[in-house]
Image: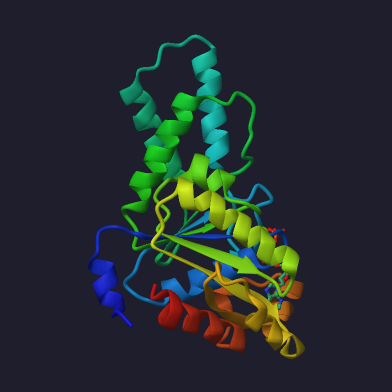
């Protein structure tokens, strides 16, 4: 397993996009990943909530003060009003506003993307935003993106520089089929180093499921159904304060031994 310090010296951030079918645990895993990466001090972590439902904000217990999409819409509106804005000025404004939208908590910065299809879609602005988020990512060691089901917005709107695509499924054929579909789209769309599927919320009686994974999906590990995670969810507690539990240990094991992140 590489030493965390070796990773931190590397200038390119590790950008992990967590994808999968709806409800399989993407947000929970993104929040647990954030918790694990934050513990690799002095690593700086950027968590991006790319789900319009803003689930990661709740899971981390952090507020959304401004979304990237609001920033984009405001700029599109200003451009539409006929005020001439040159590229440099646009870049400067977006840079400033995206930085101001970060919610900081110790070595973590949190950014919410917001509604993916806001009115007034404007390619030039979208490209700039991609650049800006890409540049922002360079200031961090780990970037964790909690996506909507599917990877469209990660691919198109957030950043092209995903280095690790982490597929999540539950113990169901539907979940696995969505992972396969995402893997196929991603193969031609983004440059990622590692892909693997984590089977989440696995119950003891479902252990056989792992043996039935299709050969084209590399297993990255399994996370058991956890009472602690359920309790935190029920009480709306931040997963940043999740105590050591089997779910956290299992995720760390996936990162260390299989994914080597
Ligand atoms: N390992 C686990 N043990 C127990 N409960 C879990 C586990 N993983 C996820 N859950 C619970 O399952 C539910 C769905 O999880 P989560 O919201 O993370 O899924 P999601 O994939 O982000 O959903 P969506 O597609 O709606 O964004 C939540 O109530 C969460 O607390
Ligand atoms: Mg979610």
Residue name at image x 74 percent, y 85 percent:
206
Q: Is residue 101 left or right of residue 134?
A: right
- Residue 29, above or below 125: below
Q: Whole-percent x and y of residue 151?
A: 57, 50
Count the numbered circles shown: 0
Q: Is residue 149 left or right of residue 32?
A: right
- Residue 205, above or below 2: below
Res 49 visible:
no
Front-most of residues 155 and 59: 155
Q: Whole-percent x and y of residue 73?
A: 57, 29
Q: Look at the image and tell me in which quarter the C terminus lies.
A: bottom left
Q: Is residue 211 left or right of residue 204?
A: left
Judged from this view, the residue extending furthest toward the top is 82
Among the 4 quarters of the image, the one containing residue 120: top right
Q: Is residue 139 left or right of residue 210?
A: left
- The image quadrant in which ligand 2 is located: bottom right
Residue name at image x 69 percent, y 78 percent:
201
Residue name at image x 73 percent, y 80 percent:
231
Front-most of residues 98 and 8: 8
Q: Look at the image and tell me in which quarter the N terminus lies.
A: bottom left
Residue name at image x 43 percent, y 39 percent:
130
Q: Whole-percent x and y of residue 114?
A: 61, 43
């Amino acid at each position: 397993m590489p030493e965390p310090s070796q990773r931190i010296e590397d200038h390119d951030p590790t950008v992990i996009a967590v994808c999968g079918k709806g409800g399989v645990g993407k947000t929970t895993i993104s929040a647990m990943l954030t918790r694990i990466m934050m513990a690799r001090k002095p690593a700086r972590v950027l968590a991006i909530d790319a789900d319009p439902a803003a689930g990661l904000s709740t899971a981390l217990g952090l507020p959304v003060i401004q979304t990237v999409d609001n920033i984009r819409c405001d700029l599109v509106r200003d451009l539409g009003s006929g005020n001439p804005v040159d590229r440099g000025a646009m870049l400067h404004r977006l840079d400033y506003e995206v930085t101001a939208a970060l919610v900081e908590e110790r070595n973590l910065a949190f950014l919410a993307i917001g509604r993916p299809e806001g009115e007034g879609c404007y390619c030039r602005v979208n490209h700039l935003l991609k650049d800006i988020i890409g540049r922002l990512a360079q200031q961090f060691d780990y970037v964790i993106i909690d996506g909507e089901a599917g990877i469209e917005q990660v691919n198109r709107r957030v950043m092209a520089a995903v280095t690790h695509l982490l597929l999540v499924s539950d113990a169901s054929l539907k979940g696995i089929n969505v992972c396969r579909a995402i893997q196929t789209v991603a193969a031609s769309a983004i440059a990622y180093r590692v892909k693997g599927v984590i089977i989440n919320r696995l119950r003891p009686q479902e252990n056989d499921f792992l043996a039935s994974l299709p050969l084209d999906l590399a297993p990255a590990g399994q996370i058991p159904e956890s009472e602690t995670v359920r309790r935190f969810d029920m009480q709306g507690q931040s997963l940043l304060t999740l105590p050591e539990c089997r779910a956290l240990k299992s995720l760390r094991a996936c990162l260390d031994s299989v994914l080597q992140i």
